[in-house]
Image (spheres, rainbow, N blue to C red):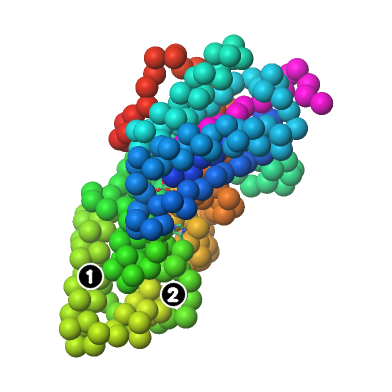
Amino acid sequence: MPIESDIFILGIESSCDDTAAAVLKNNVLLSNITAGQSVHEQYGGVVPELASRAHQQHIIPVVHEALRKAAITKEDLSAIAFTRGPGLLGSLLVGASFAKGLSQALQIPLIEIDHLQAHVLAHFISDGRMDEKMPDFPFLCLLVSGGNSQIIVVKSFDEMEIVGQTIDDAAGEAFDKCAKVMGLPYPGGPHIQRLAAEGNPNAFKFSKPQISNYDYSFSGLKTSFLYLVRDHLKENPHFIEENKADLAASLQTTIVDILMKKLIAAAHDLKINQIAVAGGVSANTALRNALLQAGEQYNWQVYIPPFAYTTDNGAMIAIAGYYKYLAKDFCALDQVPYARLK
Ligand code: KG4
């Protein structure tokens, strides 16, 4: 039975190809529902128009299920938080329009959320246990997804400074594009991880970027992977099939090395030893192991999110919304979604 002083936040996420909704009671997760979109698999990547249409079909059942699972009614909600950007504009518009309509109908506040900040704040979602470990401010967060690779100094719930980011492709894109070269389905990251488990990480060497600050670059790696495969295929048409595990393991280890090198440098220079990771690529076991190992070596407190919070989800939007609700940081109805990083 809801008590009046409890805050119930509905979080809605629709920035790419997952329609997601979650309900929080204060900072404790009550439900977290996601509808994926298999329609894109045959195209080897997300088709924006198809994503928007699928969001339209999924949004009502997903929100309905999130409320049902949380065992509350929409009248119990205190506010509605939605992803305002960055993302695919058509997809964002579905979630934003739905959130605006529902907040108006219920006469409750509307809260806009930056998708990337929400990935970082996923570390503050509670499952109600007393012994949960959450980062203290300031902490460093390595945010690695299909669209971003950033090192962020997180100073508070609403103050984050990007100290390094990719100058071209994101880490997830490197996984996905190289997987495509190998004929693997989209998204390629999980397939690379699965194959890598059987392969030799030192079988092939790929180029690594030489950039002086904390920025990343993955386009050179992608090209070097493509050229290596292309050259071997000239000699042996079965090269990919015969070497897929070694190719995957070598690629994965190169990406993890590139990510870790800059993170270690930033942690050292900025003298921060609370280190978190977020985003879809943070599901990668090799990256998780590398973080834990660095944690032992450099005396870091390492925060790795549960798998459910690595990919896009409604819970992270709801937790970001909860802290904005406490700060009374509400948004007006004329706020429109944005596609690119602010
Ligand atoms: O954060 P996310 O779900 O979506 C956005 O980019 O917004 O991240 C998706 C990315 C894809 O590039 C996917 O290949 C990658 O995360 N990914 C992985 C793994 N699981 C997902 N990459 C490597 N290993 C994984 N296990």
The question of residue 169 being in magenta is answered with: no
Q: What residue range appears in magenta?
A: 1-14
Q: CA distance from mark 1 to mark 2?
A: 17 Å
Please name the residue shown 19% across and 73% down the image.
Answer: 227
Q: Is residue 21 above or below residue 106?
A: below
- The residue under label 1 is which amino acid type? Leu
Q: Amino acid at mark 2?
A: Ala
Q: Position of residue 35 (x, y in %)?
A: 55, 45
Residue 300 or 148: which is nearer the viewer? 148
Residue at image location 43% in from the left, 37% down from the top: 53
Quickly name the residue at label 2: 196
Q: Judging from the image, what secondary structure is the residue with disc 2 in?
A: helix
Pointer 1 residue: 226
Q: Dots 1 and 2: beta carbons under 8 Å?
A: no
Q: Nearer the viewer, residue 22 or 63?
A: 63
Q: Position of residue 63 (x, y in %)?
A: 60, 33
Residue occupying image coordinates x 49% and y 19%: 100
Residue 117 occupies which quadrant of the picture? Answer: top left
Secondary structure beneath dot 1 equals helix
Residue toward you, 215 or 48: 48
- Is 4 in the magenta? yes
Residue 2: quarter of image: top right
Residue at far top of view: 107
- Residue 234, how many percent across, how many down? 17, 83
Quadrant assignment, res 253: bottom left
Badge 1 or badge 2: first in the primary sequence: 2
The quadrant in which the C terminus is found is top left
